[in-house]
Amino acid sequence: MKAKLIAIGELLIDFIPQEKGRKLKEVNSFMRVAGGAPANVCACVSKLGERSVMLTKVGEDAFGDFLIDTLDKVNVDVSHIKHTDQANTALAFVSIDEYGERDFSFYRNPSADLLLDEHEIDETLFQPHDVLHFCSVDLVDAPVKRAHYQAISYAHKHHMIVSFDPNLRFPLWKDKKKYRQTILEFIPKAHMIKISDDELFFITEKEDVNKAIQFLFQGHVKVIILTKGSKGATVYTKTTELFVPSLKVSVVDTTGAGDAFIGAVIYQIINKKMCIEDLELKLDEEVIHFAHRVSAHVVSHYGAIPAMPNLSDVNL
């Protein structure tokens, strides 16, 4: 069977303001949009044309039904999404300033995704040449953290590429020190790290970019992709670096931009049948330029999953 992406973590409703340039407390009306970084990445990969599977849990509520329907419509495999009556589906209210940047307020104490249990991770799903992707939002002390351990363990056992995007969300962590320690615990478990320039100092506590990058080469890490917003992205291996400038576009909403970028990279890893050993050689300028095109398409539209392009939207 053809290789696929398996993403684990949060699946939630983003309430996006229908007015731009206001603080969250000033927003009068919102638009309901499916979100959650791992789900966004799944949607990106599936809309571009490769298989993706989402591992998460939703509540027995209309929001959970909406999220599953949304992913199903873009061909994400939702058959492994669990349900619970012990918590509601997660919600996030978002405000967007005049530059398209966001501010979040989350409702999850706990939310259903945090209750995904390690025993609910099906090992038969994990196959060689698949890619496992995760972020940091669901690494809090909850059952879902142990589910991440289990999924990563299965991925290593079956020689899969493991991808980690810290995707920092400070409002969800009361203790920033513990947040940083948790991220540092999971970094060595991944082969590929995608990190933004504004996250680099918090995680590494190193001012010098090169020293910060080298600090991240721990454990299984083979390649680090440092994204720099509208400037571009640099791919680092232990011995090389490659900078690829991004495209100039009119930004409407940055929601899902980073997820689209890493989703586009993972799509190409699967499409080109890359294995762990290929990462240091094959994440080249062509791969990153394609990821920039996908990300540029997303920031020029509202929302994340609804904005993810089909392959025909980004092929020049």
Image (tube, grey):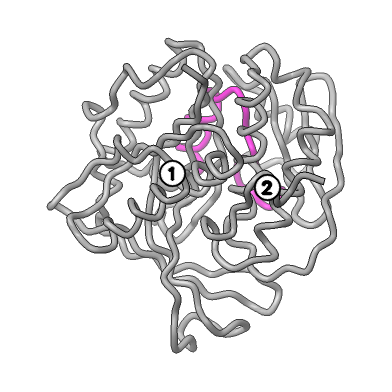
Q: Nearer the viewer, mark 2 or mark 1?
A: 2
Residue beneath the point at 60% across and 82% down: 20
> Mark 2 — residue?
196
Left/right of residue 30 with respect to residue 200 in the rendered view = left
Q: Reading the chain from its start, which is encountered first: label 2 or label 1?
A: 1
95 and 83: which is toward the camera = 83
Residue in view at x 84 percent, y 29 percent: 241
Q: Which residues are magenta?
A: 178-203
In the displayed structure, 146 sits above or below 29; it is above
Which residue is at 21% across, 54% downward? 59
- Give the amino acid at mark 2: Ser
Q: State whether residue 118 is above or below residue 143.
A: above
Could you tell me residue 280's position as x and y percent?
A: 74, 19
* Mark 2: few/some/many CA within 10 Å (<14, 14-19, 20+): some
Q: Check residue 302 for magenta coloring.
A: no
Is 184 on the left-hand or right-hand side of 282?
left
Whether 195 is among the magenta residues is: yes
Residue 178: image tag:
1
Do the numbered discs 2 and 1 sit on residues whose CB atoms are within 8 Å?
Answer: no
Which of these two is toward me, 308 or 15? 308
Q: Secondary structure at mark 2?
A: strand
Distance CA(mark 2)–CA(mark 1): 20 Å
Relative horizontal placement of residue 247, taking residue 180 as reference (left or right): right
Res 289 → quadrant:
top right
Q: Amino acid at mark 1?
A: Lys
